[in-house]
Amino acid sequence: MTSDSPTTVRPGEQLDQAALQAYLSEHAPTVGQLTAIEQFPGGYSNLTYALTTADGQTYVLRRPPAGAKAIKGGHDMGREFRVLTLLHQAGYKQIPIPITYCDDESVLGYPFYIMTRVAGVILRANMASQLNLLPETMHRLSQSMVDTLVSLHAIDVHQTGIQQLGKPDGYVQRQVAGWYNRYEASKTDDISAIDALFHYLVDALPVSPPPTLLHNDFKYDNVILNPDFLPEVRAVLDWEMCTIGDPLMDVGTALSYWSEAGDSAFRRSFNLTHLPGNLTRQEFVQRYSERSGRDVSNLLYYYIFGLFKNAVVMQQIYSRYHRGLTTDPRFAGLIAGVQALSNDGLRSIETGRF
């Protein structure tokens, strides 16, 4: 089992090491002298780098992709840094420790922040054939994932000051409208299924339970695991879409990533949850309900929202590729993913099944 290792920085995404060193020397001198900068290969949104220092320490730098604008819930480095800071101050242990945030774009050309690196394993979907993970291991890990989400939703947002991160009243309605607006702003092709999902989500709007902290992008490749005991989650990553709102929105998004053995190859390419031993989506829902005590009778709505949102995220990424703002070949076929996810959402509406 190997850790999630950084590699050579992709062309066009290099950092100015001299400018970064000058900034660190003034604003975060404890980081020390940089000796190497590498890039983590995973992820489709914000870019993540490994900074190695002369004393052998490794830190992580996060920055937005080229052509991205900071919007509420995405590519906002300052907000992501503030989330980590609030969670750290609240005593939440399953996160990297935030070090410094820079909003001066004259330094690197964009805002960025730096945090400690948590050592461990990140399970990415393309690793499936290499891992040979036992069904028992995957079963315990998938249970641990549900329990980690339950623990996130149990954080007292009022006692910790985290409630300042969002406005829970009307959250679901704003999310539905907001993601549709993002789709319209990044639209490249006519996909009628997206419009059909939007109208369903507007017409079937639920009454929300009491608000909690939401991660909003909870999946295997956003957690760091103990390499000696994979079911132990050491840290939760990628807090860029964290907010306060309806906890079932978080569950629905997690379910939309949670592929099963009978799903299409495209859906199975998202995650390792289709491997033998993992909980099914229905078992995920059942365990979440048992551990959290929440009513999940209307969770199909939230699952469909998760598919809708993921389709729009893919559309936004594909739009950057379509406009020539990135040449990353991983993005070239994402328009087919937009169609596939929106069609899966329509099927779930018709069948009433996850």
Image: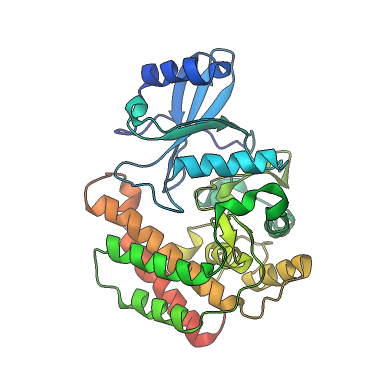
Residue at horizontal 27 percent and vertical 51 percent from the top: 321
Direction from residue 35 to residue 194 in the image, left or right: left
Q: Residue furthest left?
A: 323
Direction from residue 202 to residue 323 in the image, left or right: left
Seen from the viewer's position, the closer of residues 281 and 172 is 172
Residue at horizontal 53 percent and vertical 46 percent from the top: 238
Res 29 seen here: yes
Q: Quadrant of residue 146?
A: bottom right
Q: Quadrant of residue 342?
A: bottom left
The location of residue 319, given as percent across then percent down, is: 28, 56
Rendered view: 281 above or below 125: below
The location of residue 24, given as percent across then percent down, is: 48, 19
Q: Quadrant of residue 318?
A: bottom left
Direction from residue 113 to residue 55 in the image, left or right: right
The location of residue 77, given as percent across then percent down, is: 46, 41
Seen from the viewer's position, the closer of residues 186 and 175 is 175
Seen from the viewer's position, the closer of residues 310 and 23 is 23
Res 354 seen here: no
Rendered view: 233 above or below 11: below
Residue at horizontal 58 percent and vertical 62 percent from the top: 254
Which quarter of the image is occupied by the N terminus?
top right
Direction from residue 37 to residue 5 in the image, left or right: right
Rendered view: 34 above or below 309: above
The location of residue 190, given as percent across then percent down, is: 25, 72
Seen from the viewer's position, the closer of residues 340 and 160 is 160
Q: Residue furthest bottom?
A: 350
Residue at horizontal 32 percent and vertical 31 percent from the top: 109
What colour-coding does the image apply? rainbow
Which quarter of the image is occupied by the C terminus?
bottom right
